[in-house]
Amino acid sequence: MNCGQHLPEGAKFCSNCGTATGEVKGESSQRKTVYDGELHKCPNCGEIINAFVTICPACNYEIRGAKASSIVKEFADKLEQIERTREAQKSHSFIGKLYGSDGQLNKTDEQKISLIRSFSIPNTKEDIFEFMILAASNIDLKLYGLGDKGVITASQRAVSDAWLAKFEQAYEKASFAFVTSHDFLGIKDIHDKKIKQLKRKKLEIPLLIFGILALAFLPWLFVLIL
């Protein structure tokens, strides 16, 4: 009954496949339900969800797994590994040329910039919040103001600009996906504070130029008044 072999009357086992005749009868009279694969459910409401969903469509619960929570940490670890391979000798590159004839980046800088630019912004609020903190701490404000121009290099500015671009990208994603969430306020606060500091730094050079011009023309102004 299992393999098609003809069984003699009274046989308890098939001589061809070894199947017990009683087992075959039992299986034929009642079907078994077999589940294949994993069933993903929301831990909050029990709704069945897709494997890669981060927000439950039924209750809006944010679903975070071990893999998701380590995305930013893995990214930071990769940057540290690259930094440890920093080479003393710099080489010209296309990115460096964008910053002028003196723009030189070594291999380490290029790898860091490439990794930052290619990093995929995570989907959960907590991961984006962690990334915003990481990015904000790597945007070097002194590179955008007066600073010590003898110390600042094009490679430093290139790396900081890469962080700034990704910082803005993460904020845009958060403002689109979580703007109605209370947690978005924390992300917005990090963004607004950093951008305010950055704008203030960028005003240092124009204000300095204005001050120099004012001092230069001040004597002429007194002459005209007198």
Image (cartoon, helix red, strand yellow):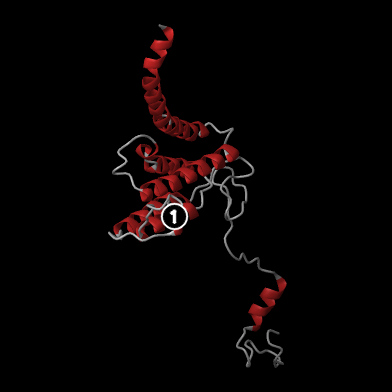
Q: Estimate the x, y position of residue 116 in percent, counting from the top left.
A: 44, 52
Residue at left offset 57%, top offset 37%: 175
Classify 204 as above or below 93: above
> Is 106 on the left-hand or right-hand side of 34?
left
Q: Nearer the viewer, residue 2 or 205?
A: 205
Residue at image mark 1 = 97
Crowdedness near tag 1: few (<14), some (14–19) or many (≥20) residues, C-alpha within 10 Å: some
Q: Residue at x 60, y 45 (%)?
A: 56
Q: Nearer the viewer, residue 52 or 190?
A: 190
* Percent x, y of residue 128: 48, 43
Q: Quadrant of residue 59?
A: top right
Relative height, residue 169 to residue 146 (above, below):
below
The residue positioned 68% from the left and 87% from the top of the image is 3
Q: Position of residue 18 (x, y in %)?
A: 60, 88
Q: Nearer the viewer, residue 112 or 191?
A: 112
Q: Amino acid at mark 1?
A: Lys
Q: Where's residue 186, x and y in %?
A: 47, 33
- The image shows residue 111, relative to residue 4, as above or below, that is above
